[in-house]
Image (spheres, grey):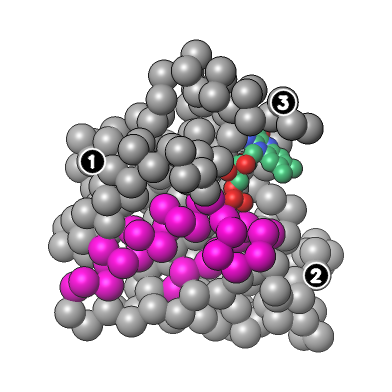
Amino acid sequence: MKILTLDGSPKPAGKSDTFRLSSRFLAGLMKQDGMTNETIRLIDKNIKPCIGCFQCWHRKDGTCIIEDDDQNELLAKFRDADIVLLSFPLYFYSIPSHVKAFLDRTLPLHQSQMVQEGNRIAFQPIEGLKHTKFVIISGCGFPQWDGNFTALDIICKNAFGPDSTRIFVSETPMLHQEAAKPVTEPLLQRFEAAGEEFAKNGCLSDATLKSLTTPMLPEKDYMDYANARHAKY
Ligand SMILES: Cc1cc2nc3c(=O)[nH]c(=O)nc-3n(C[C@H](O)[C@H](O)[C@H](O)COP(=O)(O)O)c2cc1C
């Protein structure tokens, strides 16, 4: 199985809190025989914004009319993957702008015809598109899930389908802090085990998802901890 990992943090390689989690999930996935992976850092790619021309709906070949940037190469890899692991930090309750530019430009993978899928209406995928499994991992700096990740969850359900695996984790700045290791290390281990579970079952149990997304510290403790660190600013 081919995995395409898209790292959407704009930070230098090795510095993303979110990617610390994603790379452990990936390590778990890779324990399964026959897995291959390519990791791409989206910030390093030249991805122009969508110009809304809908020429892709005439082309129908999964390519974009903008040919002087990296998107068509990325689209080919995206189409070829069995599993796409998309990792990015929460920015203003949503998706960082360079990741959003990439996602907007996946429109060529859809046809112009709307179809009813359960209780959502979506565009039909272009012919020959694989049934890719999507895992979306996002980290954020506030302690609460509700209100903070609510919009992102709706966006991802619509964009990647209700059966996509969405793992949204609050309090992630602790992942680069030595003093927080007693709570971050067990979480990282759970991410690796979850990757193994996903490789085996193609999904995560509700109990596993809960174990990944339950905040590492109670809200008040985290706020005190974070505010003490932020006092240096
Ligand atoms: C521009 C910007 C916007 C952010 N918006 C939010 C937000 O809406 N909610 C939140 O909890 N954290 C927010 N954060 C904090 C990041 O999500 C958090 O620091 C995360 O751990 C960074 O992940 P990374 O290291 O993978 O890039 C924001 C950070 C930046 C720089």
Q: Residue at x 78, y 64 (%)?
A: 50
Q: Which residues are magenta?
A: 4-32
Answer yes or no: disc 3 within 8 Å of ligand 1: no
Residue 209 in the image: state x and y as whole percent: 29, 39
Q: Nearer the viewer, residue 156 or 17?
A: 17
Question: Residue at coordinates 59% horizontally, 59% vertically from top-left?
Answer: 15
Q: Disc 1 on helix, strand or loop?
A: helix
Check if mark 2's residue and mark 3's residue have beta carbons within 8 Å: no
Label 2 belongs to which residue? Answer: 48
Residue 57, by quadrant, is: bottom right
Residue type, label 1: Thr
Q: Identify the residue position indicated by label 3 in the image.
A: 231
Which of the two discs, 1 and 3, sits closer to the camera?
A: 3
Q: Is residue 138 visible?
A: no
Quarter that holds the N terminus? bottom left
Instruction: Residue 144: give x, y in percent of width and height.
Output: 50, 23
Secondary structure at badge 2 equals loop
At horizontal 77% and vertical 81% (from top left) the residue drawn is 69
Q: What amino acid is found at the position of numbered circle 3 in the picture?
A: Ala
